Image (cartoon, rainbow, N blue to C red):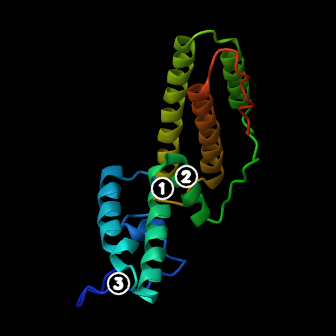
């Protein structure tokens, strides 16, 4: 997929809405992607479609804005592991709502324990340890999610398991956010939303 005409280098109309984020960057629709290659493709595409290059050119400027917006949205979604998982699920007509709860009792207990540990934390070092453990849990969840989607190369993916893992990532991301914003005496928000 190219934004420029191969023969005259003129900007082409934006791709149809059905164009996947993966197709924009010439990637296979899989969870495990080379983020460096993604960044290179992103920068190359943005260089070709940046609206400033088409300023004052009427419809072509509108096309550039549409291309640039889609490229930015695609890059942001594919770069973030959780958003990439959500996007892949959406390609299989599986959606995750903001309020979808954790159904795994062990994960729910772990989230409650982390919240309690954050409430009891007195120092930044204690919070740094919580954040490090969360980072390790997040990496393990990402690895599991990659394995679920990789298994789909030979069969259909376990969409329910992938959905559960993406929800888990959302909570782990929330924990990381709370750790970054932690301050002594500051109320710890609910980690379950």
Q: Quadrant of residue 170?
A: top right
How many residues crowd around disc 2 within 10 Å: few (fewer than 14), some, or many (20 or more)?
Answer: some
* 2 vs 1, front mark: 1
Q: Is residue 4 left or right of residue 68?
A: left
**Chain-order first, disc 1 or disc 3:** 3
Say if mark 2 contacts mark 1, CB within 8 Å. Answer: yes
Vertically, is 193 above or below 97? above
**Circle 2 is placed at which residue position?**
83
Quarter of the figure with the C terminus: top right
Report the residue marked by disc 3.
Answer: 11
Question: In screen coordinates, is 37 left or right of 109?
Answer: left
| Contact check, label 1 and label 3, Cβ < 8 Å | no
User: Is 32 on the left or on the right of 181, as rendered?
Assistant: left
Q: How many marks?
A: 3
Q: Position of residue 129 (x, y in %)?
A: 52, 16
Q: Residue at x 48, y 76 (%)?
A: 66
Question: Please, what secondary structure does the residue beneath circle 2 have?
Answer: helix
Q: Determine whether 152 is above or below 57 in the image.
A: above
- Closest to the camera, between mark 1 and mark 3, is 3
Quarter-of-image position of residue 137: top right
The residue carrying mark 1 is 76
Q: Earlier in the sequence, mark 2 or mark 1?
A: 1
What is the spatial separation of the Cα atoms under label 1 and label 3, in whole angstroms? 23 Å
Question: What is the crowding at mark 3: few (fewer than 14 residues within 10 Å), some, or many (at least 20)?
Answer: some
At x 70%, y 22%, the residue is: 115
- 2 or 3: tag closer to the N-terminus: 3
Q: Quadrant of residue 186?
A: top right
Q: Which mark is residue 193?
A: none
């Amino acid at each position: 997929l190219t934004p420029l005409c191969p023969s005259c280098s003129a900007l082409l109309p934006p791709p149809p809405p059905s164009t996947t984020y993966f197709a924009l960057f010439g990637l296979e629709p899989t969870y495990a992607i080379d983020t460096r290659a993604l960044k290179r493709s992103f920068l190359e595409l943005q260089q070709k479609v940046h609206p400033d290059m088409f300023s004052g050119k009427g419809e072509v400027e509108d096309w550039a804005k549409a291309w640039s917006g889609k490229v930015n949205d695609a890059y942001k979604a594919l770069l973030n592991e959780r958003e990439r998982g959500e996007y892949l699920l959406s390609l299989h007509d599986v959606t995750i709502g903001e309020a979808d709860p954790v159904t795994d009792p062990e994960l729910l207990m772990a989230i409650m324990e982390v919240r309690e540990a954050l409430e009891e934390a007195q120092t930044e070092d204690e919070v740094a340890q919580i954040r490090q453990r969360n980072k390790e849990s997040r990496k393990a969840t990402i690895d599991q999610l990659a394995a679920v989607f990789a298994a789909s190369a030979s069969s259909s993916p376990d969409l329910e398991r992938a959905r559960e893992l993406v929800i888990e990532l959302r909570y782990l991301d929330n924990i990381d956010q709370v750790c970054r914003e932690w301050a002594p005496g500051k109320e710890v928000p609910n980690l379950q939303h």
